[in-house]
Image: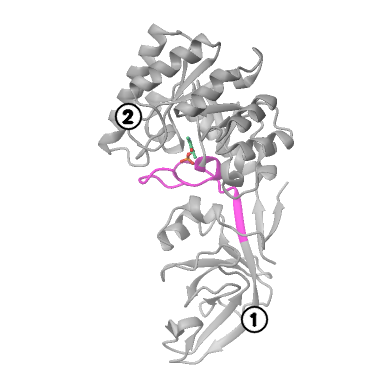
Amino acid sequence: MRTITIKPKALTHNLNQVKKMAPTSKVLAMVKSNAYGHGIAAVLPALQQADGIGVATLTEALEARQLGWDKTIGVVEGVFTVGEWQAAIKQDISCVIHHAPQLQWALDDIPPAQSATRIVWLKYNTGMNRLGFDADGVIKAAERLHAAGYQLVLTTHFANADDKENSLNALQIQRFSELLTTLQTTIDADIKGSLCNSAGIVNFSDHHYDWVRPGIILYGSAPVIDKSADELNLQPAMEFSAQVIALQTVSANTAIGYGSLWSAPQDTKTALVSIGYGDGYPRVINSDAYVTVINETNQQSYRCTVLGRVAMDMIVIDVSDMPEDTALNSKVILWGDVPHVDEIAVCADTISYELLCRLSIRPNRVQTQ
Ligand SMILES: *Cc1c(COP(=O)(O)O)cnc(C)c1O
């Protein structure tokens, strides 16, 4: 069975780690892209202690409301049309405003006083140079939104928070803090601030402001380049597993799989595992990639290297170091506790985010209690 197992206890543990790191901030738990591939319905119950959730699009926000999330929902890309703005009002969804058309929709259609849509997250481009107004644009938008009765959260996004030493970080923090002070002194002392994603939470503890926006850290991956998930006391919220479906002995100097990429230096015991890129296991991995095979009889774990090309439906692993014969149907962990998804991401020359988000619909999805 190809299985994605979600661990609500790990999610709650990681959320509590965030709360310890940012004790005075509210938490907007990021659940965009189907909760980083974990499944939004599976994660929401475990994130009940978050103050709100963040999504990328209105469609995702509406899905979360449908699932019964009744606290804050923030849409970080904001709405794409005036129709979406009106739908956001109906469902009490808070939106980022990052360009002039969104500002106009908000000024043309003002939600009722009690609506959460009356809280607008105003996006300041401090150096990422994707979404957002420049400083002048923020001030002008803030004045008009404030006059129209909106409450404001000034927000921005780091470009390099994973690398504490990158000089853009200090510049982004400085621009953000100066403009927030300006808005608070000239428009409304109650304007809030939101700066940090997961990496910012870890690396810039003096700059957490009113709302932090953790994403990847909730799912148990390390958000910074110089600390592992273990060092940050995070627990992986997903185990991705499959099973051994066949056993072979490959003779010396015989190649296996597409492209005959790997050939056996000597007679080698191999196992075929029912997982491939059709499930979301990365096709492009280097020779460091490994899996954990669980021996059914003694429940011991064995580290086995992945051999040759990853195919759509299967991979081949080297089981020659296992002390006894591998049993058919043995459980194989692609990522979870060991290997950690962060390790496989390195082997695939990408980041954990991508591996988690691009899992396909084929694996069976379950959760632990
Ligand atoms: C995705 C996202 C986050 C979370 O980022 P992580 O690196 O996963 O913590 C925070 N803020 C915004 C605006 C985002 O789009």
Depth check: 276 or 367 in front? Answer: 276
Q: Position of residue 329 (x, y in %)?
A: 69, 73
Residue type, label 2: Gln
Which residue sits at x=57%, y=34%? 81
Q: Residues within 10 Å of mark 1 (few under 14, many from 20)?
A: some
- The magenta-colored residue range is 216-240
Q: Nearer the viewer, residue 303 or 170?
A: 170
Quadrant position of residue 319: bottom right
Q: Tell me what residue is drawn at x 59 percent, y 30 percent.
A: 82
Within the magenta stretch, is there residue 217? yes
What residue is shown at x 42% (from left), y 38% (from top)?
199
Q: Is residue 100 magenta?
A: no
Question: Could you say where residue 176 lies in the image, as x and y percent from the top left?
Answer: 36, 23
Asked whether 339 or 127 is in front, the reply is: 127
Please state the horizontal and vertical placement of residue 224, each as a whole percent of the image: 39, 43
Q: Is 76 above or below relative to 183?
A: below
**Image mark for residue 246:** 1
